[in-house]
Amino acid sequence: MIVFFELIPKPKYPKYGSIVSADIALATVMGPLLGGVIVDSTTWRWVFLLNVPAGAIAIVILGIFLPSAFPHQGKPSESRPRVFSKQSMQRVDFLGAFLLIGANLTLVTALLEASTTFSWSSPTIISLLAVSGVLWIAFIAWEWFATKEHIKQEPVFPFRFFHNRYWMGMILQSAFVGVPFTVLVVDLPQRFQAVNNLSALDAGVRLLPYAMLAPIGSLVSNMIFIRRKAPLTLLFFGAVFQLVGLTLLATIPVSTSVPASQYGYQAIAGFGVGITFGTLVTITPGSVEMRDLATATGAMIQFRQMGGAIGLTIGSSLLNSHLKSHLAPPILSPDQLSRLLQSTSQIQTFAPQLQEVVREVFASGYNLQMKVITGFAAAQFPAVLLMVKVLGWREVRVVGAR
């Protein structure tokens, strides 16, 4: 993503941004389909090896075709900084990166483990949440200090970002859209397997309405942007589609059958996610100073990933708590419940009548997840309003839109 914005001429950002955002959306939502093939034919551990050859090929292609001395092409050779020099390494904000990763990791771990291994009042969970809070405060304080002119490091999140309301609205929306963007890809296939007793491949196939509409929404958003230059309107309607689709997904009947209507609900939600994601990618370069472009691009991706991780953790915590409260003895023994929380494949070991009960509890739990995820879609509206307050609804501050 960083290479993309440094390589493409500014007037062509919207055109090529649509291709990049659609590519990312398609790759993300096609994961369950390819993953289903792997799980059904061999061990799931092979999925961790897919990034090795794919990443190696991408690196080789970039190394061959990038312009010489990129991104400093056109400058005198003596003025080009050496990538692996001591001076360049001193500019890397290692401390900021460590604090950000630590704050995220401890928060996600606490939220997830509180629903499986530990209780919310346990010293372990309280300690993890406390450490996360301290690290978040330390991260903000360090970024404030690292943003000062005399500091060598280039902060991973410059404090001047906090003074840019338009950008803060974008970064918040990126985090919020990361929740449905990621959670639907994971939880819908899991629902098809746990509730509807489908194979991993069949579950991935039934995600295709979402898989197809997310990249289409991204392409449509960029086509409209090229002609109308209306990012705020696009972000607003992207949130509307998400809200409608997720609300409908939360109303799927609690049964072991697969209603045909849910495919339409997937399509609506996916289209909204694609619109929002594609628009955010396109308007990133025009929302910050050029010196912050690489950092802003990384931050946009980081917050989307962070939103997805936290959303998945919250969803898993809700589902596990729901299962614990509705499948407690005498329905399931403590050992059965413990094994079920570790793997839904344990459902197959239960008696047929008990399987029906367990699957219906799973169905109601997944509906509860969708209701919570709907809240994250609704939270995108205040983020859009934060941008409106600065610019006015019709004013656009995007490269190539003036």
Image (cartoon, helix red, strand yellow):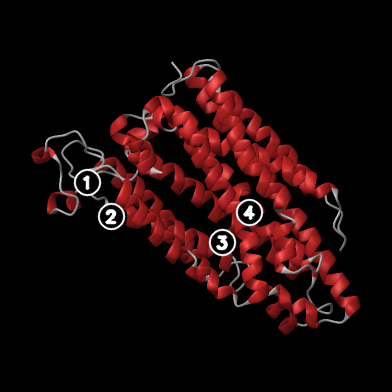
If you read the primary sequence from the N terminus, does the residue marked by circle 2 or circle 1 appear first?
Answer: 2
If you read the primary sequence from the N terminus, does the residue marked by circle 3 or circle 2 appear first?
Answer: 2
Residue annotated with mark 3: 111
- Label 2, label 4: how many angstroms apart (C-alpha)? 30 Å
Looking at the rendered image, the disc whose residue lies closer to the viewer, 3 or 1, is 1
- Label 2, label 1: how many angstroms apart (C-alpha)? 10 Å
Residue annotated with mark 4: 183
User: From this viewpoint, which residue is outermost toward the front?
Assistant: 64
Looking at the rendered image, the disc whose residue lies closer to the viewer, 4 or 3, is 4
- Label 4, label 1: how many angstroms apart (C-alpha)? 35 Å
Element assignment for label 1: loop
Say what amino acid the circle numbered 3 marks: Leu
Q: Nearer the viewer, residue 22 or 369?
A: 22
* Residue 137 vertical position relative to residue 159 in the rendered view, above or below: below
User: From this viewpoint, which residue is outermost toward the left?
Assistant: 78
Say what amino acid the circle numbered 2 marks: Leu
If you read the primary sequence from the N terminus, does the residue marked by circle 4 or circle 1 appear first?
Answer: 1
Q: Position of residue 75 (x, y in %)?
A: 16, 34
Q: Is residue 344 among the parts visible in the rendering?
A: yes
Say what amino acid the circle numbered 1 marks: Gln
Q: Nearer the viewer, residue 117 or 79?
A: 79
If you read the primary sequence from the N terminus, does the residue marked by circle 3 or circle 1 appear first?
Answer: 3
Write the residue at 28% across / 55% down: 95
Residues at discs 4 and 1 in contact (Cβ within 8 Å): no
Local crowd at mark 3 within 10 Å, few (<14), some, or many (≥20)? many
Element assignment for label 2: helix
Write the residue at 77% across / 83% down: 333
Residue annotated with mark 1: 153
Residue annotated with mark 2: 95
- Label 3, label 2: how many angstroms apart (C-alpha)? 24 Å
